[in-house]
Image (cartoon, grey):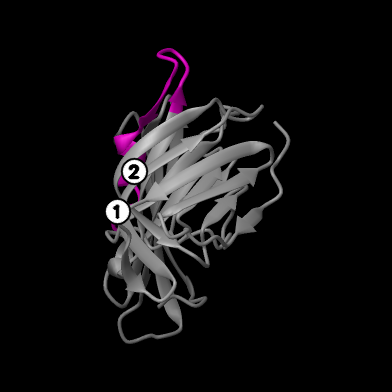
Amino acid sequence: MKAVEASRLSLSLNAQGVVQFDDRGRLFEVKVAPCVETSPDECVGTAEVSWAAATFSPAGSAQLPSLYWSAEDSFFAGALRQGHGATGYSIISSDIDGDGVEELLFHTGREGGYGGPSYAVFRWESDGGAWLEAPELSELTVGSTGVFSTDATAGASVWFADGCCRRIGERYAIQDGMPRLIERRTETLAEGKDNEVQVTIETFEGGSLVHSTTETTVAEGVK
């Protein structure tokens, strides 16, 4: 499937809490009502989202107990690369599992790292012919410092922070909506040495640890 050029939309709800917009020929309608203001550019409330069919996505709808709607960062479509800047968008459309159908991620909570956004991930289940939440994928956004980073060959990666001096990156292969851990990278600032970081890389097969290496390198912006 041809890579999608990243696009970003800033959209305000009308007085009834409704907005419609077009994404590459796919019409969306979002209703968030009532939408309680959390900041000058954001509100949250129960939501109904529906979208028409497109070549990259069957038609569908989602009933959400909550949706954080940002008038500034409303909608993002495109590949999720390292530093993609999609974290915090209300709705994200991206093919995170490489099956040719873009998943939809909805900003439904504040359970990311340091109170950041967490997402409900919906994917098309071709066997059942329906859009359903993939809870295992949604769970990966809880505690993470950003939404997925994806790569066609490397899989999907998420990062977590553990205090001031350690961060953990996990890489998953995704099949049928199920993430399978294949690598964990732990970076820890060496005690008493602000310019050194200890890096441990663990590889997994079938859920079991099969190999682990640790080395010390020069720190590059580890917080």
Circle 2 is placed at which residue position?
A: 138
As for residue 129 lying within the magenta part, the answer is: yes
- Residue 55 in the image: state x and y as whole percent: 66, 27
State the CA–CA distance, disc 1 to disc 2: 7 Å
- Tell me if 11 is positioned left or right of 164 in this view: right
Q: Which of 132 and 179 is in front in this view?
A: 132
Q: Residue 60, relative to residue 71: is it above or below?
A: above
As for residue 201 lying within the magenta part, the answer is: no
- Highlighted range, magenta: 124-143
Determine contact: label 1, label 2, CB under 8 Å: yes
Is residue 82 in sight in this rendering? yes
The residue under the point 36% across, 64% down is: 43
- Residue 42 in the image: state x and y as whole percent: 40, 67
The residue under the point 38% across, 85% down is: 193
Q: Is mark 2 on a helix, strand or loop?
A: helix
- Tell me if 209 is positioned left or right of 23 in this view: left
Q: In which quarter of the image is residue 206?
A: top left
Is residue 155 in sight in this rendering? no
Q: Quadrant of the N terminus?
A: top right
Q: Residue 199, relative to residue 28: is it above or below?
A: below
Amino acid type at circle 1 is: Val
